Image (cartoon, coloured by chain):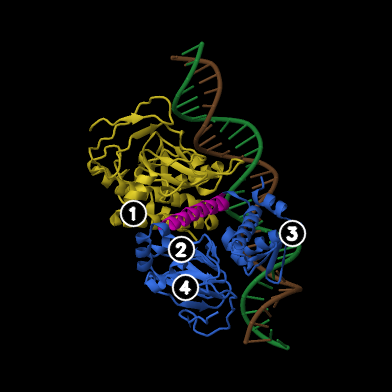
Chain colours: A blue, B yellow, C green, D brown
Amino acid sequence: MASVAQSHVIADEALPRKVHGDASPCASCPTWELSLCAALRKDCATEANGALPMSTVHTVPARRTIFHPKEWSEFVPIICSGWSVSSIALPDGRRQILSFLLPGDAVSTAFLFGPLSGRHVEAVTEVTYRKFKRSDIRALLLGNPDLFDRLSKTWIEERVQADQLALDLGRRTASERIARQILNLAERLAKRGMMSGQTMDFPLRQRHIADAAGLTPVHVSKVLGEFQRARLIEINSRSLTILNEPELRLAADWR
Amino acid sequence: MASVAQSHVIADEALPRKVHGDASPCASCPTWELSLCAALRKDCATEANGALPMSTVHTVPARRTIFHPKEWSEFVPIICSGWSVSSIALPDGRRQILSFLLPGDAVSTAFLFGPLSGRHVEAVTEVTYRKFKRSDIRALLLGNPDLFDRLSKTWIEERVQADQLALDLGRRTASERIARQILNLAERLAKRGMMSGQTMDFPLRQRHIADAAGLTPVHVSKVLGEFQRARLIEINSRSLTILNEPELRLAADWR
DNA sequence: CGGATAGTTGAGTTATCTCAAATGCAGTGG
DNA sequence: CCACTGCATTTGAGATAACTCAACTATCCG
């Protein structure tokens, strides 16, 4: 319950902050199961040994950029709370969301080893995150086989995700893609204890879903409309409930 | 010029083989620049030191499976010669090609650390490849910081490729995707010294291009037809020439 | 309350798909 | 050598998923 030091690096204004009701070694990183953050967190705990310098928590309001595509910094952000989105864009404005980042997520494992040019990371809700220095992480990993194992698991998972994304975008219909996005998010949130039953906070705008699924916001609206009329899901006041999971799964795999 | 031991693990029949006119330390791996194979090759050279057990070269005819989606083996293939294709598929037959593998390519860096379920690797032409044992590679990498650097570079490159693939599939038109595939292949072949001027061997069937671009073979045929009528490229007898690179680049980025 | 952002809905357009038939081409067995 | 079979490619016609545009409504936030 210690109050955490905050700095506003990218956001200039001070902002009201949510309070995490969690007194783990790193109060601002409520969840980290299975994620790389797990590994890093573990070492935050031993920071007294000088393993990894304690990093400050940064806070950023909704819609603000967390990492700029041209930034060539030696720091890697890891999300502590809130939702954000990692994307790449074309000069003409078309853009593709590569992943939604939830608490405990790093942008990409690859990001830990070098700058990933063109990646844009942007807050959806208010977000808190930590920045780690690449060289610190690198040294830590090379010196610690357990950590390295963890990393390589995350790495494989990430590759599988990327494969699935390509399959979705290249070969699945609009409804399938959208249904899958929802189920995916539900699963990831569940892992973090962020589902209440079949209901989740759902701060995404339809343009987020559209950019993630390679569709138009208008079309997303139509498909979500159908899903709701068919009582598969229900959306209101920024929260989404899965009403009929089996059917939704069917829609996700359909054909 | 030493004749290399061959075993036919997946292919049962003995087959006529192309001869590589190349006498580098590992005659069956003609090119490896920038790829992970580079790193592994380096150590093949020092195998006398016992760094990495010398691996046998396997030969497989066109269209044959090199790595089965359900295979859970501790061996990782690296392509020595020929073209192959790495893909994932849906039960109903829809499939997405994730990358074309050229000489020197491993399937994925992630693959070096654990099995990647669902991946299918299939020969397009006759292919030779080597199998490395995962545990050997892992030990080698952890003990050798230089190699590890190399690996992490490859890894970042791979991540960038995956990002671009998603952007292509989600946000680009059919012509853009196809033009980009061609330019991409040309560039990769050039790095390996496998271009003669603007002409390359082009063993891909249109269904390969279709599955890589998330399109229908029929549509691919139409687009390639247009490209040829517009004198951007020319295709005959399994070889492709870029006639007007600037225009082709324009088509690739167009909008 | 007012302005901005987000979502809905309908009408019409277009890129891409499906189906189908015709052609080519490569390998096989008689 | 030929006929045959199986794949690859081309082409056209029609269908459809997803897009664009535009107007309207709802929601959010100061």
Percent position of residue A40, x then y: 45, 66
Q: Are marks 3 and 1 on the same chain?
A: no
| Label 2 chain ID | A
Residue C30, image x and y in percent?
51, 11
What is the count of numbered marks?
4
Whole-percent x and y of residue B3?
Answer: 26, 30
Q: Which mark is residue A243?
A: 3
Q: Which residue is mark 1?
A: B142
Same chain letter for marks 1 and 2:
no
Residue type, mark 4 in image: Arg
Of badges 3 and 1, the one in the foreground is 1
Tell me the subunit letter for badge 3: A
Whether marks 4 and 3 lie on the same chain: yes
Compared with B9, B78 (above or below) is: below
Element type where label 1 sits in the image: helix
> In this rendering, does residue A90 appear at all?
no
Mark 1 closeness class: few <14, some 14–19, many ≥20 residues within 10 Å? some
Q: Amino acid at mark 3?
A: Leu
Answer few, some or many: residues within 10 Å of disc 2's Cα (few below 14, many 20 plus, some between 14 and 19): some
Q: Position of residue A104 (x, y in %)?
A: 52, 66
Q: Which residues are magenta?
A: A148-170
Read off the residue under disc 4. Answer: A130
Which quadrant of the structure image shows residue C8?
bottom right
Nearest the eye: B124 or B79: B79
Q: Residue at x 32, y 31 (%)?
A: B18
How far apart, in angstroms, are the residues tagged by discs 4 and 1? 27 Å
Residue A39, numbered circle: 2
Mark 4 vs mark 3, foreground winner is: 4
Local crowd size for mark 3, using a 10 Å CA cut-off: few (<14), some (14–19), many (≥20): some
Question: Is residue A215 rendered magenta in the image?
Answer: no
